[in-house]
Image (cartoon, helix red, strand yellow):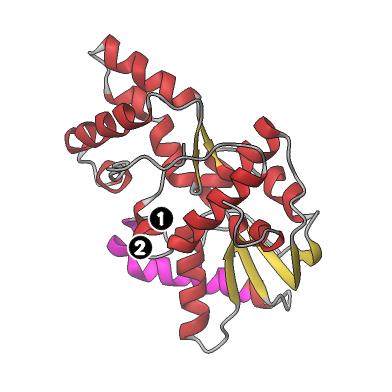
Amino acid sequence: MIFIPCLVQDVLPEIAEACGRVLHAAGARPEIPAGQTCCGQLLFKLGHVRKVTPLARRVMDLFEPADAVVCPSGSCTRMIRSYPDLFPSDPELAAAARSLAAKTYEFSQFLVDILGVLDFGAHLPATAVYHDSCQVGRALGVVSQPRQLLARVRGLTLVEPARPDACCGFGGPFSLRFPGVSEALVQEKAESILATRATTVISAEPSCLLNIGGYLQKNTTPLASLHIAQVLATGLTKGTR
């Protein structure tokens, strides 16, 4: 089953479509259960833990039948994997949360580590930077998997900025609570990307793509911003679902 982050559902639905098509091409049977809600990450980061538990229980109930849960966002993946900590005094719910956490994967991690499918016949004639988001790279430790997938994209030249894992400054509520610091971080990130002369920014984190792409566009140096699922889907026909 695919967990669709709020940001993807409301702002970048094309990422969800690409994710489903790629998973289908990899031999999986992707399903998107109806009635999905937020994973609770924003409330959790703001310290409203009690308000997160009803959302977590909803996600746990919806995805309990899944063999695996795949998410095109490292931050939401990390949040779902943190659910067991929400139920310290309820062994039954904690066990259900651990079961869900154990079968929840970030998109590129699932393709490489679980399915073992790396080549989708993708073709993208571009010079691109891959942005290691804090949640995908540091929190989940998913660093080599996206690069293994991108190395098999025809026509794509991948270049590394000075600090590929430097934070872009989004951080969910961080950018709202500390806009000055956030702006300085994304400016530094954008400058390092532009220094590579790349034409495209690729990431596995939708929020980072919006933040980096928005800054570049605002400062009249727009680059194409693509989720890794969108890149891999370039090798698939529109009928592949």
Foreground residue among 122 and 177: 122
Could you give the CA–CA distance between mark 2 and mark 1, rounded to whole angstroms? 6 Å
Q: Residue at x 60, y 78 (%)?
A: 223
Residue 81 location, x and y as percent?
Answer: 43, 30
Secondary structure state at the residue bearing disc 2: helix
Secondary structure state at the residue bearing disc 1: loop
In which image quadrant can residue 55 be found? top left
Side (left or right) of 228 relative to 85: right
Side (left or right) of 6 relative to 23: left
Residue 218 location, x and y as percent?
Answer: 46, 84
Which numbered disc covers residue 208?
Answer: none
Q: Residue at x 34, y 57 (%)?
A: 174
Residue identified by numbered label 2: 175
Residue identified by numbered label 1: 171
Residue type for callout 2: Ser
Residue type for callout 1: Gly
Tell me if residue 120 can be seen: yes
Q: Residue at x 36, y 39 (%)?
A: 33
Write the start and end of the magenta stretch as one range: 173-191
Q: Are marks 2 and 1 in contact (CB under 8 Å)?
A: yes
Tell me if residue 169 can be seen: no
